[in-house]
Image: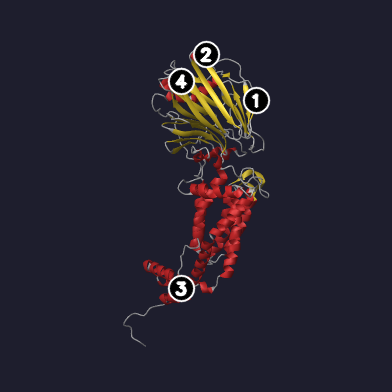
Amino acid sequence: MDRNSVTGLALIALIMIVWLQFMSPEKKDLQENKSPRGAKTELAEPGDERAAPISLKPASDTFGAFAAVSSGREELVRVDNDLFTITLSSKGATIKSVVLKKHLDGKMQPFNLVSAPEKGALSLLFLNNEGIKIDTRDLYFRPLFSEKRTTLSGSRSAVIAYRLDVGPQQAIDITYRFSGNSYKVDYDVKLTGFNNALAGNEYQLQWDGGLTYSEKNREDESQNALAGAYLGGSLVKMDAAKENQSYREEQSGEAGWVAVRNKYFAAALIPGSKTDGIYLEGKRDSGHFENYLASLKMGVPSTGSIARDHYTLYIGPLDYNTVKKLGAGLEKIMDFGWDWLTRPFAEYIILPVFTWMNGFVSNYGLIIIIFALLIKLVTYPLSMASTKSMKKMAALQPVLKDLQEKYKDNPAKLQSELGRIYKEAGVNPLGGCLPVVLQMPLLFAMFYVFRSSIQLRHHGFLWAKDLSVPDSILDFGFSIPVYGDHIAIFPILMGITVFIQQKITPTAQSNEQMKVMLYIFPVMMLLFFNNLPAGLGLYYLMFNIFSVAQQFYINSTTSADDVPQAALAAAAAAAAPKKKKGSPKK
């Protein structure tokens, strides 16, 4: 490659480094004193209640008409299916524990996704006409079943129902329906006698507490944790980026879902009927944990004594194919980068190919190698054209230098002559960079896939125990600026292959700048990839190995015939001094 090509590659690498600093989800610095939207704002501030001191008031003052059900005995029931174990509580008819069976934490141990199991995650929240805020997690429901444990498998299903008898004509019924082989849970709410009994004729269904962090690197996981909603065909995201600052987002309209997520898992509430809006709340503590609340605002008809709402709960891994089957657009919470560039590569090329190959290749390391080979075969015509273009550029260098010397005081004329010679010789000065530039969206898309989807998590290859994190073989215990706190092998091998590839690739110049770039560029790539997922380092390593092999083949099969001698002769003639018209003949 000539100096311009190498400079272009260096700039691309620099852009990659800078651009990745801004790839975390959009941060919305929502002020704690943000103005409410309408008269229902007081209802949508459960965070204030969590921090409130213990009340010494009588139950009738604290709970009003709900005082009779504010005390009782908590009863737990455990539901086991093929994918998870969920613990439900009669206090609040809530979910206190979700332990996934096929996914462990970073220490390879089972873990509870519910971050605050003592109070539970799921509840109804509303303001009654007495001005009292009610969170159903403070109330004791009556179980409508006797089993303490239910085990399901395959196509079997089970119903777990609770009732809250508020008064002679008032009751709240909560019903869960579990399937044997699904992360999806059906959730039904039935309100009896609450028409005109709630402020604003509205209640909220909320998931409170975010999700427990599962990975060793808490800082990295906090960069992927967020609360989100799909409202009016667009995605609303909240990232509690700053410590000890409250973030709030309230919008009206019809929502497709609200959800909270950490790096690899999500809990989503998907309504089966029209909503009045959404409410998101978040706060980050000093330990990097981001505590989120996500709720759907639901209207209660003022006529009729019974109001029914159906929901779908999804509590499970952020597996693209799994969440897409829900048909609610929940896959949009997965971060695949720019919607107009990298996301199509992720959704329509990388993930489908990986899923297809996983049907007959179980090891994801081998799948990455095969994928790199396929990409190299697809880009072979570009690589061949690039090599021929660089050989032509190398042959043109003496002529180009003569032109640069001849027209050094006339830049416009020089550019005109260079353009004409490039055209006659069939040369594209940027042809050497074209294959690399075209692969950049794919490389960025693979970064997002490897970082945010669960396919590579805890899948090892060779010395890499987990392809979703760097393949560290030595941890320093301290961090070196730019490089990181560990030594990863794939980036080192990749840097070596980059050096070899540059050595054997035809170049139009051999000046000192080119010699310096021969060493600088591999080091840049080493530093850049040292902290990226091992799967991405493996892909780029294998792609470079295939590129080296391909370059050896191209070098051995191309000859001087690929350089148009006639065009070079014409270029040389153009560069030669021309006689002025009317000069005397000798």
Labels 1 & 4 near each other (Cβ < 8 A): no
Labels 2 & 3 near each other (Cβ < 8 A): no
Cα–Cα gap, marks 1 and 2: 30 Å
Q: Which mark is residue 306?
A: 4
Residue 286 pos. (x, y %): 56, 33
To which residue does mark 3 refer?
A: 399
Labels 4 & 3 near each other (Cβ < 8 A): no
Of all residues, the one furthest to the front in this rendering is: 155
State whether residue 72 appears in this view.
yes
Element marked by disc 2: helix
Element marked by disc 3: helix
Q: Which mark is residue 67?
A: 2
To which residue does mark 1 refer?
A: 149
Quadrant for residue 499, please give it.
bottom right
Q: Is residue 580 above or below residue 65?
A: below
Q: Earlier in the sequence, mark 1 or mark 4?
A: 1
